[in-house]
Image: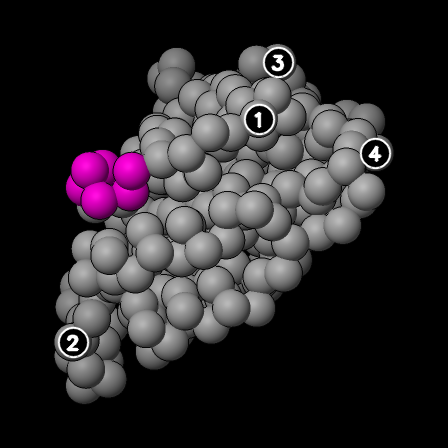
């Protein structure tokens, strides 16, 4: 679970208090901790900082950030700027420079600006999801600090899952399904009743069998980028003959998780095997070292 600290001025006005409450509700619904405070040094470590910046509080907030530099070094941070009654936004250059240079923080470039009209709950949810992904990536980077390129290369040589074997009543029908929905590629035959397919470097075998059934809860998972999850869900829905199932979602069909980061869709292949197509959730981004090691 990600922990955020929201730093605000000593006497937040009604507009600031409303925004703090709304961000707290959105964070709680997404499964994150969010602690609002006017005393940064008392909060201990956090995965990410959210600095609520008003024009008349810049100097005081800068002083607090200066005092807590060591505590929040190399931490994700973002600014939420509160415009005044004339719609003027507080300048952020000085604090951004302080955070990126003195504290060596990772400043999320897509800060939030609150004008006279409040942000909708959906807008706050989308913004926090983006910042949460950024924070989770920074958290994992901190965990990998000191890992050399050679160590990353060695990690890639460790044993890894190589293939799965799925069953099908008709090899041609099953091959066509995985080719048309996912772009899987036929590799070769292993005898007359089994073929080897490949999807983005992962082999899977399709074996012909006359009688079989999969137990409840049994499924395979295919991780994809969020836009690809949606694209595949649209392709499956447009097909009309593929059965959508609920899986871990609220109902059959494409859906987002509580963190508004993970998206998923569940459906059955021609022989009743449940296939889950999903994008990485926050917990995976912040804990799965392989997601970053593969990029080194």
Name the spot of residue 242 as percent of width and height, x first.
71, 27
Q: Quadrant of residue 209?
A: top left
The residue singled out by tag 2 in the image is 146
Classed neighbour count for the residue bearing mark 2: other residues with Cα under 10 Å, few (<14), some (14–19), many (≥20): few
Q: CA distance from mark 4 to mark 2?
A: 48 Å
Q: Residue at x 32, y 73 (%)?
A: 102
Measure the C-alpha gap from mark 3 to mark 2.
44 Å
Label 3: how many Cα within 10 Å (few below 14, some 14–19, many 20+):
few
Q: Which residue is the site of mark 1?
A: 13
Q: Quadrant of the C terminus?
A: bottom left
In three-dimensional space, the C-alpha distance between marks 4 and 1, rounded to whole angstroms, equals 50 Å
Q: Which mark is residue 212?
A: none
Residue 238 got which mark?
A: 4
- Residue at 34% across / 56% down in the picture? 63
Query: Upstream in the sequence, badge 1 or badge 2?
Result: 1
SS assignment at label 1? loop
Nearer to me, 8 or 263: 8
Q: Which residues are magenta?
A: 39-44
Earlier-in-chain disc, 3 versus 2: 2
Q: How many marks?
A: 4
Which of the two labelled residues, at mark 4 and mark 1, occupies the earlier sequence position? Answer: 1
Residue position marked by numbered label 3 in the rendering: 251
Q: Nearer the viewer, mark 3 or mark 1?
A: 1
Front residue of 132 and 168: 132
- In the rendered view, would you say 46 is above or below 242? below
> Label 3 vs label 4: CA separation?
18 Å
Residue at 45% in and 38% down: 9
Q: Which of the two marks, 4 or 2, is nearer to us in this view?
A: 2
């Amino acid at each position: 679970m990600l922990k955020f600290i929201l730093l605000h001025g000593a006497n937040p006005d009604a507009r600031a208090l409303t925004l703090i409450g709304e961000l707290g509700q959105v964070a709680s619904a997404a499964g994150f901790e969010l602690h609002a405070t006017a005393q940064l040094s008392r909060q201990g470590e956090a995965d990410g900082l959210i600095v609520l910046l008003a024009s008349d509080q810049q100097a005081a907030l800068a002083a607090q950030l200066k005092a807590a530099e060591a505590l929040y070094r190399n931490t994700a941070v973002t600014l939420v700027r509160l415009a005044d009654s004339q719609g003027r936004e507080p300048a952020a250059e000085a604090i951004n420079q302080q955070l990126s240079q003195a504290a060596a923080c990772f400043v999320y470039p897509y800060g939030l600006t609150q004008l006279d009209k409040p942000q909708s709950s959906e807008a706050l949810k989308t913004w926090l999801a983006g910042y949460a992904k950024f924070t989770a990536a920074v958290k994992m980077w901190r965990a990998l600090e000191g890992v050399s390129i050679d160590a990353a290369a060695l990690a890639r040589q460790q044993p890894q899952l190589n293939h799965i074997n799925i069953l099908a009543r008709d090899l041609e029908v099953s091959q066509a399904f995985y080719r048309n929905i996912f772009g899987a590629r036929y590799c070769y035959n292993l005898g007359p009743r089994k073929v080897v397919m490949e999807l983005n470097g992962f082999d899977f075998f399709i074996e012909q069998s006359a009688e079989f059934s999969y137990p409840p809860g049994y499924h395979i998972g295919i991780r994809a980028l969020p836009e690809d999850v949606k694209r595949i869900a649209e392709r499956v829905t447009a097909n009309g003959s593929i059965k959508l199932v609920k899986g871990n979602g609220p109902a059959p069909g494409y859906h987002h998780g509580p963190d508004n980061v993970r998206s998923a869709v569940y459906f059955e292949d021609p022989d009743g095997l449940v296939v889950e197509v999903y994008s990485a959730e926050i917990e995976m981004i912040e804990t799965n070292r392989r997601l970053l090691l593969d990029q080194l």
